Amino acid sequence: MGITLKNPIFWTDIPDVDVLRHGDTFYMVSTTMHVLPGCPIMKSKDLVNWEIQSYIFDTIDDNDMYRLENKEKNGVYGRGQWATSLRYHDGLFYACFACNEMDKTYIYYTEDIESGKWNRHTLDGIYHDSSLLFDDGHLYIFYNCGDVRIKELKPDASGVLEGGIDQLLFSTPKEHIGLRCEGCHAYKIGDYYYLIFIEWPTDGNERRREICYRSKNLLGPYERKVVMDDDLGYHNKGVAQGAIFDDENGNWYSMLFQDHDAVGRIPCILPVTWEDGWPVFGIDGKVPHEWEVPFEAWGKFDMVISDDFNHAENKLANNWQWNHNPDHAHWSFTERPGYLRLTTGCIRDDVLFARNTLTQRTEGPSCQATVTAELQGMKNGDFCGLIALQSNYGTVGIKMEDDKKYLIMTTKDGEQASMHGESDTIYLRVHFDYEDSRDIATFFYSADGTEFSKIGVDLKMLYTLDHFMGYRIGIFNYATKETGGYVDYKNFEYQRFELEN
């Protein structure tokens, strides 16, 4: 019995992973920052095939930043939910993460990890890249970058324990290190406490690598060891930061991720063995391109999907997420069955601040998305279409001016192409090429859905830290002059293309 696992397991943006096994099922969380609902629960029984099961929260808060009303603060791009720690203890699942723009750390909890019904406790302040550890009736949170701290929480996670442990645990090396240890994952395994981190040296390979600290005593002293330093043969981009976990039969694994430029940060799964009480990652010190895991295949699931929008209720498939908080009064599957209707509800002058932009991830090595837009409901000043969404964005769509429709392609530098359009139906397409970090998006249109023509310029996609997310495909419609216009979208068709041998 066994199936082949190929790395990366996803060629798409699933960063800051944490993995928990409960019974025969593996659960994973990942950072989703400014797209909502947030913090997906993904499940698997074979480590190869993963399903987006639910989300921990629909919204974090409903304020002007999350509603894209505060341009000065740039919304919550690149912030929101970061680096969640997923744990199980005494009948409850816990998910802990810091939220930078709120200056809060949230601990969500539930009895049923798959239901999407979570409650939360709130801690004041930022516990950066934290990890929870339940240990013999106590609960600790480890956090910080470089100067690693430990604080004791109340056993039910409802707050800081008065008089509990609160101290600097240790400081990590500074010499020849650009990014000191962060992304903590804390475990008690056997006689040892283990803390694993990422760090980024500035000598030698100069790539992110995985570091393990261990001690038989909670408060140390801790020993240090480099446990993974490999790039999977890809541009010296280290595979590091993530979780270790076991299966029911005592086999151990690690899920880490790798920076892959514009497509984002993509996860890999490695075998883990133990030697002299240290975890040994990978095979012969390397991340294997493929290897056999001892499970039967349990299902095939896609991270990104096509959607005909023919839904009986206003409920999104779990693959979709909104850019920031949606305005639920201004989107619908039911106003015109078989279509996604996006109605303008506010005035905006920038596609990055449009409400109700509906997004999915994109995937390597290359992919494309096509959608049909019906335009009869547009008003003057409206702009609708598809966006390759990151800070350095590109769009293809229709703009309505003086009762005339114009097909345009834009980048953040403005309009790159414009032509008059007569039809009330247009087919729009964006193609994403991530092979070998080429990172080019190309934009197309069609009058009949069969013959497509390129429009505008190629977009050199850039992974920028102000958004801190791999490129997404987004469907948008916003008003620049008056509200109430609408566009009906149908037949979102997504295709992923494999590498040619």
Image: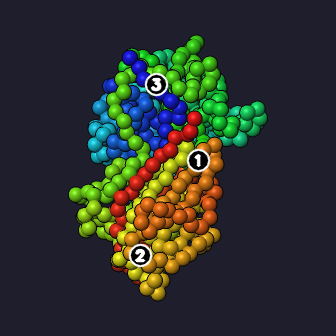
Image quadrant occupied by the N terminus: top left
Front one among 335 and 322: 335
Closer to the camera in the image, 2 or 323:
2
Q: Mark 1 points at which residue?
A: 434
310 lies left or right of 347:
left
* Residue occupied by mark 2: 423
- Residue 4, which numbered label? 3
Tell me which label, 1 or 3, sits earlier in the chain: 3
Q: At numbered mark 2, what does the secondary structure look like: helix, strand or loop? A: loop
Left or right of 59 on screen, residue 418: right
Alpha carbon distance from label 1 to label 2: 33 Å
Please name the amino acid that badge 3 sits on.
Answer: Thr
Of labels 1 and 2, earlier in sequence is 2
Instruction: Identify the residue at image location x=58%, y=20%.
Output: 283
Q: Looking at this view, is 12 or 250 the one in front?
A: 12
What secondary structure is found at the residue carrying circle 3?
strand
- Would residue 120 be seen by someone viewing this image from the given angle? no
Quadrant position of the C terminus in the picture: top right
The amino acid type found where label 1 is placed reads Tyr
- Above or below for 93 versus 5: below
Give the quadrant of residue 176.
Answer: top right
| Neighbour tally class for label 1: few under 14, some 14-19, many 20 plus, Cα within 10 Å | many
Q: Are marks 1 and 2 in contact (CB under 8 Å)?
A: no
